[in-house]
Image (cartoon, helix red, strand yellow):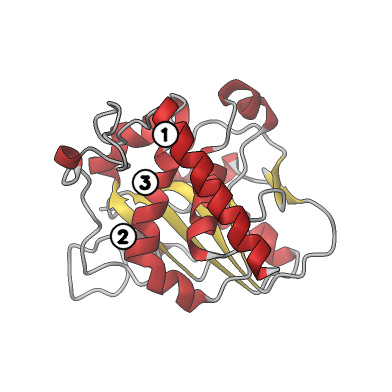
Amino acid sequence: MRKMKNSYRRVGKIRERVLDIVFPPRCPACDKPVPLPGLICPACGEKFTLVKAPVCLKCGKHIADEREEYCRGCRLVIHRFERGRGLFTYQSAAASMYRFKYAGRREYARFYADQIAERLGKTIRGWRADALVPVPIHAARMRERGYNQAESLAVELGRRTGIPVKSRLLKRVKNTLPQKLLSDRERQNNLKRAFKIRGNDVKLKTVIIIDDIYTTGSTIDACAAVLKSAGVEKVYFITAAVGKELL
């Protein structure tokens, strides 16, 4: 079985190399074709800013006051997840995140997954997750975009960590408004009954929710609540970017 998995991985890598030659991947920073064999232009390597310590022990946001263990948002809200981490500051990655989500740049997922596996791999391994679960999008948005950016990221991260991806575990049954347009209270109401579990027999103890951006945690909380109601014991999250600490 292990030999078969290794063979599939080698075939997958060869396929990626061929596709990269025919359709060079776009740089996630400047969006220009990347010189092979890289995933980002050499001159763009410093354009993304990593979330710096100290970080919130709950959500991973940078904390301005190093005397605090938790950010203001996590001191005010009881989250349904155990812990989470985001890699880049949203300010530095906003344009890239927009193209990744709305402009068809799903190939950016390879760069984000590489960076997450390299920089947050120890944390991910420490959580001992049974599966990666991408935040689902509604069927109407899937038809519009053609892909789910969170699923693309989860698949690439699964390849690098060896953790199985369960893309069909959660279903989005409510076509919610974009969270960025809403207040904190509106975000919570917007996501009520937005997700459900596919099937009745969930045999996972620990999962990591994968999404592109973490802001207030409303989406992660909504997914975590549904997962825990189905029997999942521990829920963590990983995102490519994370917003500022609430003031």
* Residue bearing the label numbered 3: 111
Q: How many numbered marks does the figure carry?
A: 3
Task: Name the image quarter holding residue 80.
Answer: bottom right
Cα distance between the residues tagged 3 and 1:
13 Å
> Looking at the image, which is closer to me, 9 or 100?
9
Q: Residue at (40%, 38%) from the top-left corner? A: 108
Please state the horizontal and vertical placement of residue 91, each as a whole percent of the image.
Answer: 24, 42
Specify whether 55 is left or right of 117: left
* Residue bearing the label numbered 1: 20
Please state the horizontal and vertical placement of residue 34, each as a whole percent of the image.
Answer: 28, 33
Specify whether 159 is left or right of 226: left
**Of the two numbered discs 3 and 1 in the rendering, the one whose residue sits closer to the viewer:** 1
Please state the horizontal and vertical placement of residue 156, each as a whole percent of the image.
Answer: 50, 50
Q: Residue at (50%, 48%) from the top-left corner? A: 13
Label 1 with label 2: CB-CB less than 8 Å? no
Number of residues whose C-alpha sits closer than 10 Å to that of mark 2, classed few (under 14), some (14–19) or many (20 or more):
many
**Of the two numbered discs 3 and 2 in the rendering, the one whose residue sits closer to the viewer:** 3
* Residue bearing the label numbered 2: 61
Q: Residue furthest top?
A: 144
Please state the horizontal and vertical placement of residue 224, each as a whole percent of the image.
Answer: 60, 60
Under tag 3, what secondary structure? helix
Q: Is residue 215 visible?
A: no
> Looking at the image, which is closer to me, 167 or 18?
18
